[in-house]
Amino acid sequence: MIGDEKSPGWLERMVLALPEGAVLRCVFVALLSVAAGIVFIDYREIAEASPDEGRISRTTPLPLDRPKPGDQIRPYLPRTMPVAPDRGEPSLPGYDGPVEGEALAEPMRFFSGPDGQVTAIGRIEIGTAEAMREFLARPEAEDAKAIVLHSPGGSVADAIEMARDIRGLKLSTAVPADGYCASACPLVLSGGLTRKAGEGAWVGVHQVYAVSGAEPGLASTIDRSIAEIQATTAECQELLVEMGVDPALWIKAMQTPAASLYVLTEEELAAFRLVRPFPDGESFIGPPAPRYPRFEALPPEAPDPEPTASEISDREPAAPVSRPGDDAEEVPGSAS
């Protein structure tokens, strides 16, 4: 009935009082604000990532001031090399192509030069150690005496293998004047029987990091356990000790973020023994790291079995117990 209808509440009256279309406009404004907020967040993430992406993808040389003592941190360039206003191009024996850009971004290549010198230019990728072995086994490299390095680094595992192969073949290593040897490359440099760096060479280290294959120079999003990082760092330090290099060098690496590079001064290169004009004596070569065996878990001990009746009968009989009336030795002075 009409008389039974209730009057609208205050909320309903307020909604009915709104001009036509006002609710839709409010909803539209709210959606527009949310969309603008999402665009702003995306833009900020892109802006923050763009400097790192630019550093990683850059293949043209990046002008940077020459490092000085106390001012030695520079951006790490995984695909090219830094240049300074007074810096020239490195001379690489047996190689006459470009020394930056794609030449450094490509996997490491090897070229035979005069006087037993072999140039190694490019990134150290997975498989580079095997590629170096194959090259040094060729007739054109049978008289090899020294490996000349120009590399932004790369795979730590391959760099360690290369260093040990170089030492096993009693070859020397060098970074040419104005050359670039970064990241894992100094590990290869350490393998030389003698080691040198030319004037203006940039030799730098930084933290070990994981890479996702398509993005060299950028830390991987895959989680790495602390144990794995420690094991890799220990392998680097073990190699340096074996090669006669002061392992304290790797403290500089561990203190430097993966996106940066700690460029060593000439004095530091000599102090850490990364540059060594004469072969090291045996006293500077440390023992190999121990190989820890794996122990199988011991099975739980079984409880002792209950003794059988025959085992009980074989046991030593208990001492006899005296009873009244039994014959016994008389003790003097006792009452009867």
Image: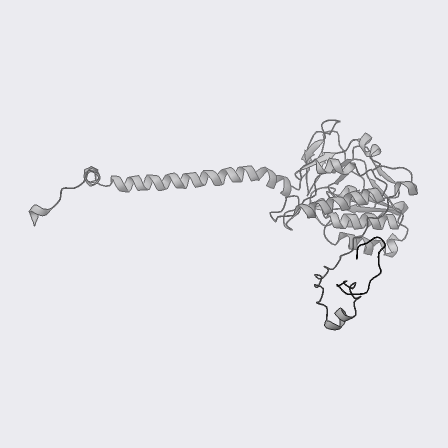
On the image, the x and y values in percent for residue 313 come to 76, 71
Is 81 situated above or below 222? Answer: above
Q: Is residue 310 above or below residue 266?
A: below
Q: Nearer the viewer, residue 162 or 132?
A: 162
Q: How is the image coloured?
A: one colour
Residue 141 image offset from top left, x and y in percent? 87, 52
Q: Nearer the viewer, residue 119 or 214?
A: 214
Q: Is residue 296 left or right of residue 23?
A: right
Residue 70, compared with residue 139, is above or below; it is: above
Specify whether residue 271 is in view.
yes
User: Seen in the image, is 119 located left or right of residue 80?
Assistant: right
| Residue 88: image location, x then y, percent | 77, 34
In the displayed image of the protein, which residue is found farthest to the front? 336
Percent position (x, y) of residue 64?
69, 31
Q: Is residue 150 visible?
A: no
- Please give left or right for residue 155 compared with residue 116 in the image: left
Residue found at x 7% / y 46%: 3
Q: Which quadrant is the C terminus positioned in?
A: bottom right
Q: Quadrant of residue 139?
A: bottom right
The residue located at (84%, 59%) in the rendering is 330
Q: Give the tally of numbered discs.
A: 0
Quarter-wise, where is residue 240 in the image? Answer: top right
Q: Quadrant of residue 56?
A: top right
